[in-house]
Image (spheres, helix red, strand yellow):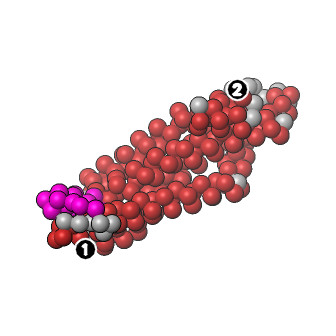
Amino acid sequence: MREGLDLIRAELLKISRRKISWALLAVLVIASVLHARGLRAEFLDYRQAQETGIGRFDQGIAPEVAVATTADLARRMSFPDVLDEVWSTTDFWGLFALMILAALQAGEEFDHGTVRTLLLRGMPRGVWPAAKLVALATAAAIVWGVLAVTILPIGLWTEAQVGGNGGLSAVDVPQWGAFTGRLALSWLTTIPYMAFSIWAATAARGAGPALALGLGG
């Protein structure tokens, strides 16, 4: 038991010291910002078409379509809907980021020969992948929490682009609870995928083949 806990702590330390861990986190935040900017561009496009029937890029848009789409975008860009709108991007790309991290965590052990050393010391075969999965799941929970917090300023900026002023006060307690539940479910969904990445790295005995199998295959 103690050996497994020590291995989990060591795995968490390795994850925190990896430059790619921080790079992937930065990419996810940037993806959320870009999605918000894309919504703004789309909103401005349809708002202009309400009066002229022509979007900002000279495409023809029927006024009634422009009115309906502008209203829908305004709703999606305001609280509480903007929470799920921005999170959908983070959730999608975050899964891929965690699979990459899991494949690297497991695969590099074979690349560096660490697995052989651990097994020669008498560590049970099941402890090593289990410790990695627990550490990765813990790291994923922390990342999910950080990303959820970043949604708040992004959402406030997005809402401001449509002239909204409801802010966080527009989200009541049940809505916050429902959003938290969706985040928790999203986090739980990542665990089987990370487990698959660890298995792929173990079967392929390396990070490179695991990434090709898990992400490209």
- Image coordinates of residue 64 in percent, x first then y, are 13, 59
- Residue matched to label 2: 203
- Residue matched to label 1: 163
Residue range highlighted in magenta: 59-78
- Image coordinates of residue 60 in percent, x first then y, are 23, 61
Dominant SS type (magenta): helix
Give the farthest residue toward the left. Answer: 64
In which quadrant of the rendered view does residue 35 lie? bottom left
The residue at 51%/62% (across/down) is: 30
Residue 182 located within the stretch drawn in magenta: no
Type of amino acid at the residue the image marks with label 1: Gly
The residue at 51%/48% (across/down) is: 94
Q: CA distance from mark 2 to mark 1?
A: 53 Å
- Image coordinates of residue 183 in percent, x first then y, are 41, 48
Type of amino acid at the residue the image marks with label 2: Ala
Frontmost residue, 174 versus 108: 108
